[in-house]
């Protein structure tokens, strides 16, 4: 059976934290063409730049603009040519801003467009303000709009997306996370994995852990990741005199993350709404930790509340409730059997409702439906 040709378009080629886009590239049941480098992409993976600085190419494209009107830029014309040469059947735009930018090209090519929102593209106020009109055009043209959390669904509807175009499709962890076997149910180590940015509020984890350490001197914390707040958190760790108990190794290989999960008591994440409105979608690290059998201690924020069942698979606190997070961390240190019970229940929940196979299968079916219509 001949597979559909899907153009997956992302503004970034290799952002280490965008594991969901990597999964779309590798796992969709389609012949994927991966475009990157801008909302109007300039590069096709394995083939190189779409446009050229050579005079014949520039003259040809400028002549086309004169013949067909000036609605499309040179980059858009180059992308239009590539879609035609690659015999693309459908376009999957990663992020709302990408989808909005691609509407003119898809409309000219007569191609259906699926737009996959991820988080900040549906929440950051400056993005919403600058894309108010283009999002309206996007919602009118797109064949399907993917939201990764129930909260995001509501926000997209409020922005004008028709309900009948919305598809709820949270991410899923890769299968290897289900294979992790905890080494020590009485481990005193907590782990956090994520970028050091405002919406992750890594400093709140440090403040909470400071309180935990006052009662449990053997407690340990590993915070994996990097980002603009990493150095500030390193300084804060020293000011709070936590150097002996806190490790900030930066970005590490996936195998190292899985090894840390195997040696941890619980996963912690203190997501909040950033000062610019930035919010999570459904954090992949929360899903991965749940699949690994770790209880989750986090905030009632965006898609986290879809994943964690309070009191059964972990604990949730309000945003910026440092004392509440510290109390929940201490509770699991004092009751490692409870941590194991919650982690087991969490793994079962992820396996039943949030697998990668389910996430990819939903996109595969969406592609089939869109092409069929």
Image: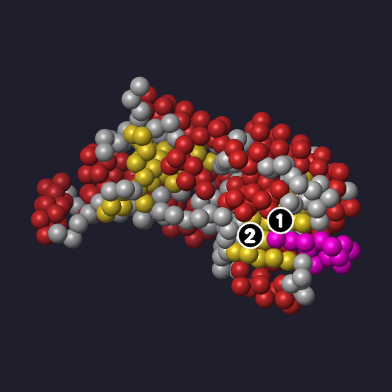
**Mark 2 vs mark 1: which is more N-terminal?**
1
Q: Which residue is mark 2?
A: 224
Q: Nearer the viewer, residue 245 or 342?
A: 245
Task: Report the magenta residues as a range.
Answer: 209-222
Residue furthest to the front? 183
- Residue 128 in percent (x, y) is at 48, 55
295 horizontally vs 159: left or right:
right
Q: Residue at x 51, y 51 (%)?
A: 18
Q: Residue at x 37, y 38 (%)?
A: 32
192 inside magenta stretch: no
Q: Which residue is mark 1?
A: 191
Q: Quadrant of residue 270?
A: bottom right
- Residue 285 in percent (x, y) is at 63, 49
83 horizontally vs 118: left or right:
left
Image quadrant holding the N terminus, namely: top left
Q: Are marks 2 and 1 in contact (CB under 8 Å)?
A: yes
Asked whether residue 324 appears in the rendered view, the answer is no
Image quadrant holding the C terminus, namely: top left
Kind of element beneath mark 1: strand
Residue furthest to the bottom? 239
Q: Residue at x 35, y 30 (%)?
A: 4
- Distance between the alpha carbons at the discs numbered 2 and 1: 8 Å
Kind of element beneath mark 2: strand
Q: Residue at x 74, y 52 (%)?
A: 264
Local packing at callout 2 (Cα closer than 10 Å; few below 14, some 14-19, many 20+) is many
């Amino acid at each position: 059976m001949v597979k559909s040709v899907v153009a997956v378009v992302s503004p970034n080629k290799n952002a280490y934290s965008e594991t969901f886009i990597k999964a779309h590239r590798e796992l969709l049941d389609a012949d994927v063409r991966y475009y990157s480098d801008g909302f109007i992409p300039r590069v096709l993976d394995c083939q190189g730049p779409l446009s050229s600085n050579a005079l014949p190419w520039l003259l040809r494209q400028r002549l086309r603009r004169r013949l067909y009107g000036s609605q499309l830029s040179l980059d858009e014309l180059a992308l239009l040519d590539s879609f035609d040469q690659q015999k693309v059947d459908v376009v999957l735009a990663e992020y709302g801003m990408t989808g909005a930018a691609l509407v003119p090209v898809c409309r000219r090519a007569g191609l259906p467009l699926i737009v996959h929102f991820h988080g900040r593209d549906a929440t950051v106020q400056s993005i919403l303000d600058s894309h108010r009109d283009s999002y309206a055009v996007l919602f009118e043209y797109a064949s399907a709009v993917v939201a990764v959390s129930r909260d995001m669904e509501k926000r997209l509807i409020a922005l004008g997306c028709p309900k009948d175009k919305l598809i709820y499709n949270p991410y899923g962890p890769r299968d290897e996370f289900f294979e992790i076997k905890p080494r020590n149910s009485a481990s005193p180590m907590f782990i956090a994995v994520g970028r050091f940015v405002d919406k992750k509020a890594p400093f709140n984890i440090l403040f909470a852990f400071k309180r935990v350490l006052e009662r449990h001197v053997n407690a340990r914390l590993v915070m994996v990741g990097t980002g603009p707040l990493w150095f500030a958190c390193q300084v804060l760790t020293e000011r709070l005199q936590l150097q002996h108990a806190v490790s900030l190794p930066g970005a590490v290989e996936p195998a190292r993350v899985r090894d840390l999960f195997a040696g941890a008591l619980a996963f912690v994440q203190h997501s909040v709404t950033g000062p610019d409105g930035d919010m999570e979608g459904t954090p992949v690290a929360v899903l991965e930790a749940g699949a690994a059998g770790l209880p989750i201690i986090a905030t009632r924020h965006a898609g986290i509340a879809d994943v964690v069942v309070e009191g059964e698979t972990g604990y949730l606190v309000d945003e910026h409730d440092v004392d509440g997070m510290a109390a929940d961390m201490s509770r699991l240190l004092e009751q490692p059997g409870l941590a194991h019970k919650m982690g087991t229940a969490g793994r079962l929940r992820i396996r039943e409702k949030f697998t990668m196979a389910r996430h990819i299968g939903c996109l595969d079916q969406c592609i089939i439906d869109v092409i069929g219509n």
